[in-house]
Image: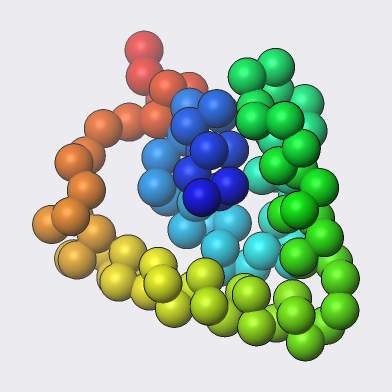
Amino acid sequence: MVYFHASALAGDTLDAVLRWLANPLESPEPAEILLTHPAAVTHWHGPLQGVLTGDDRTAGNTVTAIQQAMALFFHPDIRRRCVRSRPARHERR
């Protein structure tokens, strides 16, 4: 849920969420958005950072569970059938 919230705040699409989820330990953007955006839900930055940077087993299990939950969206054909196509806010003119 925090990834979707960060993406919405940034005006990004599901592609940003999937990019972050593909390698969450190397994706600081969601936490930065949640920490700095004025419309972000208060204190969502902390739990996200805690889960990803805490105990290695907890972080690994969390990452695996999230990736499995979103796995169908990593397949472009399935994603196209499930998600209406629209450019991200920063891609619109």
Marker count (numbered)? 0
Q: Nearer the viewer, residue 31 or 40?
A: 40
Q: Residue at x 64, y 68 (%)?
A: 23
Q: Give left or right: position of 45 versus 89.
A: right
Which quadrant would the C terminus be assigned to in this image? top left
- Decide: is 69 above or below 45: below
Residue that extends furthest to the bottom in the rendered view of this protein = 57
In this view of the protein, which residue sits in the foreground, 62 or 93?
62
Q: Position of residue 92 (x, y in %)?
A: 37, 19
As drawn, the residue found furthest toward the front would be: 42
Q: Nearer the viewer, residue 15 or 1?
A: 1
Q: Residue 42: x and y, percent?
A: 72, 30
Q: Quadrant of residue 81?
A: bottom left
> Image point 41% across, 72% down: which residue?
69
- Please name the residue shown 76% across and 65% down the image: 51
Residue 84 position (above or below residue 36): below
Q: Is residue 75 left or right of residue 90?
A: left
View extreme (right): residue: 54
Tell me, what colour scheme is on the image? rainbow
> Residue 15's x, y, as percent?
42, 50
In the drawing, does residue 66 fall left or right of residue 36? left
Q: Residue furthest left?
A: 81
At 32% from the left edge and 64% from the top edge, which residue is drawn? Answer: 73
Q: Is residue 34 left or right of residue 91?
A: right
Residue 35 x %, y %: 78, 33
The answer to which image quadrant residue 55 occupies is bottom right
Q: Is residue 23 above or below residue 44?
A: below
